[in-house]
Image (cartoon, rainbow, N blue to C red):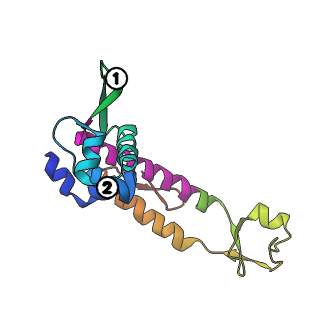
Amino acid sequence: MAFEELLNDPVIQKYLHELVGPTGMPVAAAPPDGEVTDEELAEELGLELNDVRRALFILYENDLASYRRLRDEDSGWLTYLWTFEYESIPEQLESEMRRLLEALEQRRRYENENEFYLCGQCQIRFEFGEAMEFGFECPQCGSQLETMDNDRLIDAMEMRIEELGDELNVDTEPDIDGAIDA
């Protein structure tokens, strides 16, 4: 996928926005060709230098930018020349999706394997063991705890697991209890 196509993809724009936030998005969304200093970027984009540096560091931490240091012979000051490296974004997104899939599967197992109770007043949720410890009364307000039906939550997770499995071309099969596992 070409560099420009990457930046026009709404999924990639959202990914970059999640990484650098609204103040860093101008830096992430308009990378120059070749090397550039943080000062040049700040001036070109009309942003505060600290905002540009914060965005560049976040991109660097996520392997989307690299830098080269140069020391001025006269003053001894360091200049950082930044290069944007967005070629790996599709692989990083796939990796994020796989992590999300794994987390959803773990959460689904947790939801399936536990019984929950809810305080109708405080909307605090308790596992069976916790509810039993409190005598099935809310420790905050003293209200009676009610059995919580989490079937809708599990169904929503299973739908999302199946969607992610389809997007990642991962076979998802039902668990023994009917849940989907990838």
Q: Is residue 177 magenta?
A: no
- Can residue 165 be seen here? no
Q: Nearer the viewer, residue 64 or 104?
A: 64
Q: Nearer the viewer, residue 23 or 60?
A: 23
Choose the circle earlier in sequence order: 2 or 1.
2
- Please name the residue shown 34% across and 56% down the image: 17
- Can residue 59 be seen here? yes
Total marks in image: 2
Q: Mark 2 or mark 1, which is nearer to you?
A: 1
From the viewer's perspective, is residue 152 above or below residue 52?
below
Residues at marks 2 and 1 touching, judged by CB atoms closer than 8 Å: no
Res 60 quadrant in image: top left
Question: Can you identify the residue that label 1 sits on?
Answer: 75
- Please name the residue shown 34% across and 37% down the image: 63
Question: Can you identify the residue that label 2 sits on?
Answer: 25
Res 162 quadrant in image: bottom left
Q: Which residues are magenta?
A: 82-109
Q: Is residue 107 magenta?
A: yes
- Please name the residue shown 35% across and 53% down the image: 24
